[in-house]
Image (cartoon, rainbow, N blue to C red):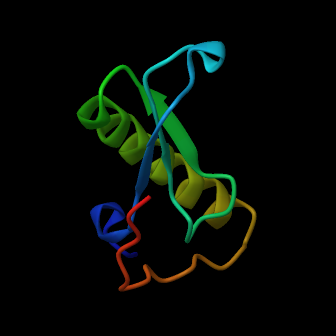
Amino acid sequence: MADRLEYPVVIEPLSAEDGGGFSAVVPDLPGCMSDGDTPEQAIANVQDAIAVWIEAAQDLGRSIPRPSRHLALA
């Protein structure tokens, strides 16, 4: 199984209407995202989401995408 820390994460600020803080999205894993009050918290929270995403994919017999090697800055 791929190490969950290898997946690129895109961090973006959330608007006040969306509750503020920061979103963390994992482009390699469709629908895998989290948020936090700070960028660091968003990254920490999305690591748990990655683990849950991978576990759910395994339970459903779905393939798990390999981490891409590019870095996206938003």
At a point 51% along the width and 37% down the height, the residue shown is: 34
Q: Is residue 24 left or right of residue 6?
A: right
Q: How many marks?
A: 0
| Quarter of the image that includes the C terminus | bottom left
Q: Position of residue 50 (x, y in %)?
A: 47, 53
At a point 30% along the width and 70% down the height, the residue shown is: 6
Q: Position of residue 69 (x, y in %)?
A: 36, 86
> Which residue is nearer to you in this view: 35 or 14?
14
At a point 68% along the width and 53% down the height, the residue shown is: 31
- Asked if 46 appears above or below 10 in the picture, the reply is above
- Asked if 36 appears above or below 72 in the picture, the reply is above
Q: Position of residue 73 (x, y in %)?
A: 38, 64
Q: Quadrant of residue 43?
A: top left
- Asked if 46 appears above or below 1 in the picture, the reply is above
Q: Is residue 57 left or right of residue 45?
A: right
Residue lying furthest left:
40
Q: Position of residue 36 (x, y in %)?
A: 40, 25
| Quarter of the image that includes the N terminus | bottom left
